[in-house]
């Protein structure tokens, strides 16, 4: 700013007092202010990224710390020998399971005494801890009569309250006496733990099992819905990959510049931003209401997710087709290939790694999608077991991992929330491995032209 | 599964056709490859294509058309008197289909033989008892017209399927025969096959259009149906949302205003979290961060976008909700009643949207030409002054577009609000109160047994329509702005 532009009144005093010779190294107030503003601005940026990463860490911590307990379960491990005579006697009584239960309690007390612990074992307390063991034992021996007279080890699942006590979900202070578990039972549980009768083992039933009833949280597993998700992903893969690649090839290599092409492009970019629940409504109305496809079937879920992931796959496929340099096409055309041959023999194979990466990411997105599945009836409680065969896997009602997690989360029982977190760990393991596969593919086959 | 076998038969005919077509072309050229117009495999592919395409087209059209025909025949069979008060033709037809499925299952389990299930003069009571014994009747009463209609339904469907199988196989065989006849050395097989492939490519690209049409039609028809049962003005301007599932929904009040309010309130909270954090992160990453920091921080932030929304939902319900409750609840400030609230859902949704805002803004800021930065530095501006006074104004349209896209994401988000926002529809200003959104209500109205005749279920389609229109509008505006902006600096 020069003095000439200043009004005379303000310029006057400046002219009177001679300019202080200022060193460039002496920082004046304005510079100090500006530097401080600069620092502040940079700090805001770092804070923003810090907050983002902090949320990521909190999320990861919440998932891991609350999901891990779902992978262990509490069993009551009792070994005893049932003689032929005992078996016949028990079968001869009026209350048969009751008789077996007495044998079981006898064995339990024996094992406690072996460890040198004296404690009264009441049948009622045992029933609260392991349910009614008599039925399971009788069932076993009736089916395996040849095992009579030799030692047999039983791993009986402890009730969900005991499970909660073992995993720290329920403490002595927080629990109230109920018909499910009494405070006095916890002494017995502690003694049984000391005698190594109650043990914590890896929860295989959670990995392999199916959803159980509302009152039986301990038996619920995610296996059946993993199978449901798997069949859905098969449908998505075998429909969206060919359709997506075909559509991208047309748009990228053959489409003329006209209204129709524009219409397709606008539709694809809009569909990519349509909320997923709208695709669920589409699936409900078109596939179930109109075409009468079976409700809750992974086939329908796969179709809906295919439509949902197509835009994602088309966008990434087009990007990787675009990345193949025109010289490849020109060379193929130059030696006499038709345009179709140049595309399918040369461009497509070169773009394949990129296409596969995009497809895997699209599949991962589809795998975690919940809302549309709820609308077509793939809710968790439908997943009651494994499908009988390959074709039934597509058509029989089943659930999917995220829908199963939602069903568990919606039940108010704390034992089910633990299952829900565990389910999320399983889901994230699948997603993580798919994404790692995508990264490896990209690293391995990526080609810079 | 007969359909599976039918498809397999067509594919086998195509495979045989391929081999024959290839062989015929070779023999017509006398084994001389150079005498053929195209490579031999094109002759085979020509035959296979001509078998598969018409046969599958016929199959698809037939599968779509048959239910219509059967339904209209069955619908005519049911007299007006058989439709009870409060019921509808659609419900009776569903009943007929259930009964027919019951008969199918009864035949499959051996409770009755095929002859008996089809016999129209069979004793009505006898059939009912047998069905009940086989455990196939869910409804308590099955009426005479419904049973007769179900029998007719089964007969129509089975003859329809039989005719379809024969027709499809005949078409496949005829096409194979015709394609083989035209195969000779001069036939321009490659051009024909390439035309065919191009048609398939165009069809694949058109699926995007078909999907949009499908979405619009399924929303429009059911919304129309809903507005016939429930006045549109009450829906759009009603201030109360209280669906009643009893009494066939006649006493329900289905006003969308509270739901829209909840939706916008939660979205605004989410954007208030996501936009500042996302924007500052984007500015820092594109203007300040070195390549190493960028290579680590950017993918880590984007992990947040790759996490399924159900995870965020659970996080809101079980972690953030209780945390907020302990601060603002009865033991703290006393303004929060339960863990599920606008704040809970909005906060978590904001976390989800951070990478969405930051990635898009990052791209847009990077697209601002370097010359503008250099000019600003040359005038003596600091980095932050350059960002605030040069880069952000230049990138503003693009950033607005990115925020609009994030807003459309927030409005359409489902699982977080289903789990985190509560279920009560209310008009309130307190962000610590539970509210509900359009998407959450779509889920709750349509999950479970969807009965397409009552307003309480159909309202979901009207809600979906509203949601679709709002997000579509936002997307179109946002994409337009972003595209315009990109062109500006290209």
Image: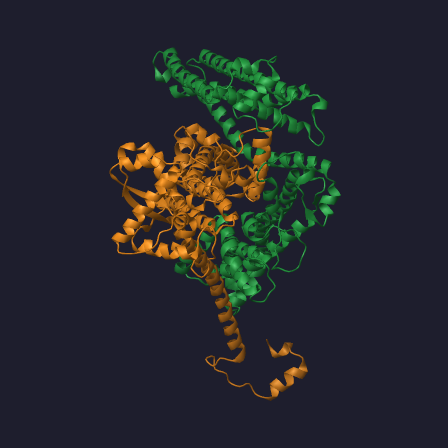
Chain colours: A orange, B green
**Where residue B403 appears, x then y in whole percent?**
58, 54
Q: Is residue B35 left or right of residue B364?
A: left
Residue B214 quadrant: top right
How many labels sit on residues?
0
Q: Nearer the viewer, residue B250 or A41?
A: B250
Where the N terminus of chain A falls, by quadrant? bottom right
Q: Nearer the viewer, residue B411 or B366?
A: B411
Does residue B405 lie above or below B162 as drawn? below
**Where residue B95 appears, x then y in whole percent?**
62, 26
Q: Nearer the viewer, residue A160 or B437?
A: A160
Q: Nearer the viewer, residue B447 or B17?
A: B447
Does residue B10 lie above or below B317 as drawn? above
**Where residue B46 appears, x then y in whole percent?**
45, 19
**Where residue A58 appears, x then y in whole percent?**
45, 59
For the point 49% across and 60% down, the residue is: B281
Q: Is residue A94 visible in this depiction of the protein?
A: yes
Q: Is residue A72 left or right of residue B254?
A: left
For the point 56% across and 47% down, the residue is: B414
Outermost residue to the bottom: A17
Q: Is residue B39 visible in this depiction of the protein?
A: no
Residue A260 quadrant: top right
Q: Is residue B462 left or right of residue A426?
A: right
């Amino acid at each position: 700013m020069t003095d000439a532009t200043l009004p005379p009144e303000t310029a006057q005093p400046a002219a009177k007092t001679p300019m202080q010779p200022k060193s460039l190294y002496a920082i004046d107030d304005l510079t100090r202010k500006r530097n401080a503003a600069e620092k502040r601005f940079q700090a805001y940026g770092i804070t923003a990224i810090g907050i983002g990463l902090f949320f990521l860490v909190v999320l990861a911590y919440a998932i891991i710390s609350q999901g891990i307990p779902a992978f262990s379960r509490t069993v009551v491990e009792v070994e005893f020998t049932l003689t032929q005579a005992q078996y016949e006697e028990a079968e001869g009584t009026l209350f048969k399971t009751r008789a077996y239960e007495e044998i079981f309690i006898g064995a339990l007390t024996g094992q406690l005494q072996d460890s040198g612990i004296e404690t009264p074992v009441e049948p009622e307390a045992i029933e609260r801890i392991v349910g009614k063991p008599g039925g399971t034992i009788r069932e076993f021996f009736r089916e395996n009569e040849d095992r009579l007279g030799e030692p047999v080890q039983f791993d009986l699942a402890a009730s969900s309250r005991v499970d909660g006590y073992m995993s720290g979900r329920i403490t002595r202070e927080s629990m109230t006496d109920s018909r499910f578990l009494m405070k006095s039972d916890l002494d017995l549980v502690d003694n049984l733990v000391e005698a190594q009768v109650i043990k914590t083992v890896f929860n295989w039933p959670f990995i392999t099992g199916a959803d159980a009833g509302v009152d039986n949280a301990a038996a619920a597993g995610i296996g059946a819905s993993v199978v449901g998700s798997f069949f859905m992903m098969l449908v998505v893969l075998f429909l969206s990959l060919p359709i997506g690649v075909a559509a991208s090839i047309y748009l990228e290599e053959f489409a003329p510049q006209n209204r129709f092409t524009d219409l397709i492009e606008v539709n694809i970019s809009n569909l990519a931003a349509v909320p997923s629940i709208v695709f669920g409504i589409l699936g409900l109305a078109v596939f179930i209401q109109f075409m009468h496809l079976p409700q809750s079937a992974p086939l329908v879920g796969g179709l809906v997710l295919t439509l949902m992931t197509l835009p994602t796959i088309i966008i990434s496929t087009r990007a990787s087709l675009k990345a193949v340099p025109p010289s490849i096409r020109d060379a193929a055309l130059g030696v006499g290939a038709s345009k179709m041959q140049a595309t399918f023999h040369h461009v497509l194979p070169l773009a394949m790694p990129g296409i596969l990466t995009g497809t895997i990411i699209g599949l991962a997105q589809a795998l975690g999608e919940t809302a549309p599945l709820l609308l077509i009836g793939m809710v968790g409680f439908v997943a009651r077991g494994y499908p009988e065969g390959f074709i039934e896997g597509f058509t029989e009602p089943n659930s999917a991992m995220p829908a199963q997690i939602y069903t568990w989360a919606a039940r108010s029982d704390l034992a089910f929330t633990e299952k829900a977190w565990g389910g999320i760990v399983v889901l994230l393991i699948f997603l993580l491995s798919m994404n790692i596969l995508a990264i490896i593919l990209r690293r391995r086959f990526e080609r810079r032209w | 599964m007969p359909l599976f076998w039918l498809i397999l038969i067509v594919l086998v005919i195509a495979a045989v056709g391929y081999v024959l077509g290839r062989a015929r072309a070779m023999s017509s050229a006398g084994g001389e490859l150079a005498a053929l117009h195209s490579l031999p495999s094109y002759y085979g592919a020509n035959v296979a294509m001509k078998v598969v395409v018409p046969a599958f087209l016929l199959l698809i059209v037939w599968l779509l058309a048959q239910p219509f025909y059967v339904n209209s025949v069955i619908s005519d069979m049911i007299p007006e008197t058989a439709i009870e008060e409060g019921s509808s033709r659609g419900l009776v037809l569903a009943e007929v289909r259930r009964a027919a499925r019951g008969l199918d299952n009864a035949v499959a389990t051996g409770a009755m033989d095929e002859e008996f299930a089809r016999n129209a003069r069979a004793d009505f009571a006898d059939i009912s008892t047998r069905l009940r014994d086989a455990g196939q009747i869910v409804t308590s009463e099955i009426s005479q017209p419904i049973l007769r209609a179900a029998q007719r339904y089964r007969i129509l469907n089975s003859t329809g399927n039989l005719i379809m199988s024969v027709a499809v196989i005949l078409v496949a065989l005829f096409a194979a025969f015709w394609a083989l006849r035209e195969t000779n050395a001069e036939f321009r097989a490659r051009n024909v096959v390439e035309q065919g492939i191009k048609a398939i490519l165009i069809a694949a690209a058109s699926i995007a259009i078909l999907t949009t049409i499908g979405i619009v039609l399924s929303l429009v028809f059911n919304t129309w149906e809903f507005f016939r049962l429930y006045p549109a003005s009450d829906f759009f301007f009603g201030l109360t949302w209280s669906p009643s599932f009893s009494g066939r929904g006649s006493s329900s009040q289905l006003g969308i205003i509270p739901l829209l309010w909840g939706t916008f309130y939660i979205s605004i909270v989410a954007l208030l979290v996501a936009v500042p954090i996302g924007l500052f992160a984007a500015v820092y990453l594109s203007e300040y961060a070195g390549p190493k920091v960028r290579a680590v921080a950017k993918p880590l932030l984007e992990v947040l976008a790759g996490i399924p929304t159900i995870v965020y939902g659970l996080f809101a319900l079980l972690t953030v909700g209780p945390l907020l409750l302990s601060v603002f609840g009865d033991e703290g400030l006393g303004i929060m009643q339960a863990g599920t609230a606008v704040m809970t859902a909005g906060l978590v949704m904001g976390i989800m949207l951070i990478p969405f805002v930051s990635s898009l803004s990052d791209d847009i800021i990077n697209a601002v030409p370097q010359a503008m930065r250099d000019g600003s530095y040359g005038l003596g501006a600091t980095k932050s002054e350059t960002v605030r006074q040069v880069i952000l104004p230049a990138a503003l349209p693009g950033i607005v577009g990115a925020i609009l896209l994030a807003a459309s994401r927030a409005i359409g988000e489902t699982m977080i609000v289903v789990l985190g926002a509560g279920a009560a529809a209310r008009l309130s200003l307190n962000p610590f109160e539970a509210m509900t959104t359009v998407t959450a209500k779509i889920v709750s109205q349509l999950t479970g047994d969807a009965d397409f005749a009552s307003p309480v279920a159909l309202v979901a389609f009207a809600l979906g329509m509203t949601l679709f229109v709002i997000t579509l509008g936002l997307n179109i505006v946002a994409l337009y702005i972003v595209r315009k902006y990109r062109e500006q600096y290209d």
